[in-house]
Image (spheres, rainbow, N blue to C red):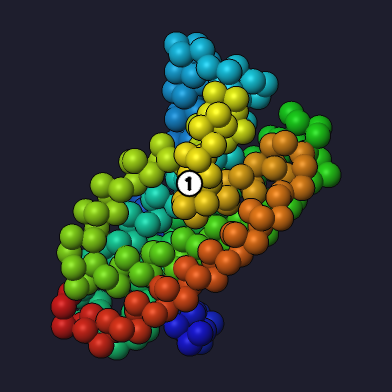
Amino acid sequence: MTVYADLFRYRELFGNLFRRDVQAKYRGSLLGVAWTLANPILLMAVYLLVFSVLWHTQFGSAGHYGLFLLVGLAAWIFFASALQSASRSMLDNANLIRKTRFPRQLVPLSIVATHLVSFAVMLLGLLVLNFALLPRVRGTEWLAIPIAVGVVALVSGLALAVASLDVLFRDIEFLVAALLLPLFFLTPVLYPLNSPDISKHHKVVEVIHWANPLAPAIQALRDPLFYGRLPRAADVVYVAVAAVGSLALGAFVFTRVDDQIAVEV
């Protein structure tokens, strides 16, 4: 796909956009990228309090529930923050787009790359932490890395699609923001889909698992990174197909609106 091949052809420009976005994100911060860990850790603490203490659930009382949460939160925070930031990235860079002719897809993809730094830091922290605290994952946790690559591809395609559509339909960014909250609770971040409390609702579980592209990705990440087992083949295939489909969707939408971007922003 030439849309993504431009990342290599214009790698110097992409690198400049990426550095600009990273510097803008962490400008004036004493801890810089270390703040990446603050959000998932704070959320983990809150959910531990709710599901392990205030609302004593079976899955919340399981061993190392905090690590279980962190795996899901790492993927979710990357997905949600990258999509939301990318949704209006074309509009935020309107002056640059109007003045200079360059591959416009680099703008939302540089936003994804910026959030990828946070995702990589969280994933690296999980690899180290789980290796130390969960001996069962020491032979399998490295399998989470190719799954994470699939998540990045999935997010990149969706980000390019929503950023392109937002140029024509300004409601897209508000729609994305509105959908993220219900989608969070319909994604197995806080709970395992095989929990007895949940799995009895078989049809609902199947819909959550297969209709939400992030659900199989989180399941496939948790298997080697938390449970210490090989990810299910169905989840891996789903992630691969969803990643390719997402990239194709992003390229399709972008090529349809590319000629109108400079006029509409």
Q: Which of 95 and 126 is in front in this view?
A: 126
Measuring 59% from the left and 40% from the top, which residue is drawn there? 71
Residue 82 in the image, given as x and y percentages of width and height: 40, 56
12, 120: nearer the viewer: 120
Q: Which residue is drawn at 83% across and 44% down?
A: 139
Residue at the (58%, 66%) spot, across then down: 241
**Other-residue count near label 1 (Cα within 10 Å), few / some / many at <14 / 14–19 / ≥20:** few
Query: For numbered disc 1, what is the local secondary structure?
Result: helix
Q: Is residue 181 visible?
A: yes
Where residue 166 appears, x then y in whole percent? 24, 67
Front one among 25 and 73: 73
The percent position of residue 173, horizontal first and vertical second, equals 24, 58
Residue 92 sits in which quadrant?
bottom left
For mark 1, what is the residue?
207
Q: Is residue 151 left or right of residue 137?
A: left
Residue nearest the observer in this picture, 236 or 14: 236
Quarter of the image for residue 264 reads bottom left
Q: Which amino acid does label 1 sit on?
A: Val
Looking at the rendered structure, the number of numbered marks drawn on it comes to 1
